[in-house]
Image: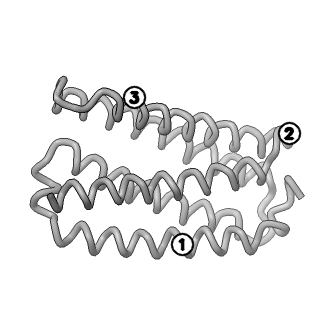
Amino acid sequence: MAYSADSWRDFYVMTGGASAALTGLLFVAMSMHAKAITDHPLYGTRAVGTLISLLTQLALSGAVLVPGQSTMAVGIEVEVAAVASLIYTANAISRSRRALGPDRPRVRTILESAGGLIWIILFLASGLSLMLRTGGGFYLLALVMLFMFGWNVYVSWVLITEVSD
């Protein structure tokens, strides 16, 4: 089961639907505070990053559901998405640190950086696991998808509550 996409159909239908729903809700919530989000150096980066992450989950759910696609092909698609996420995240962190300087709370920054690092490492490992057919395969990707979804809910909540203050 760890390397059979057919066994995971229901899970990826669920994650794709949940990602699509949260993307729509976040888009509506952000549109209500668009000016405050785009004017702030951190909020805009968070908003775009969260939307990209949710759309990545939606795309990956769709990729797993493509009939007849090999595990290697899914693994390559996951790895490409993971590397793109790594690059975007590194750039976003760099931009945010330059824009905010030392004003950001240190404990929260450390916790958020650790959460992001764990997610990226697991994401990269899941693509390799599928390509090499070792190390958990779709079980590891499922863990990544759940962590990613939880992370997106957290970031969305923080974004909306900070903007509405």
State the image coordinates of residue 128 (x, y, percent, origin top left): 72, 38
Q: Is mark 1 on a helix, strand or loop?
A: helix
1 or 3: tag closer to the N-terminus? 1
Q: Mark 3 and mark 2 in contact (Cβ < 8 Å)?
A: no
Q: Which residue is drawn at 55% across and 38% down?
A: 120
Q: What element carries label 2?
A: loop
Mark drawn on residue 141 = none
Q: Which residue is drawn at 53% across and 58% down?
A: 149
2 or 3: tag closer to the N-terminus? 3
State the image coordinates of residue 145 (x, y, percent, origin top left): 61, 55
Q: From mark 1 to mark 3, how far is it between C-alphas? A: 28 Å
Question: Where does label 3 land, which residue?
Answer: 110
| Res 113 quadrant in image | top left
In the rendered view of the protein, which quadrant contains the C terminus?
Answer: bottom left
Q: Mark 3 and mark 1 in contact (Cβ < 8 Å)?
A: no
Amino acid at pointer 1:
Ala
Q: What element carries label 3?
A: helix
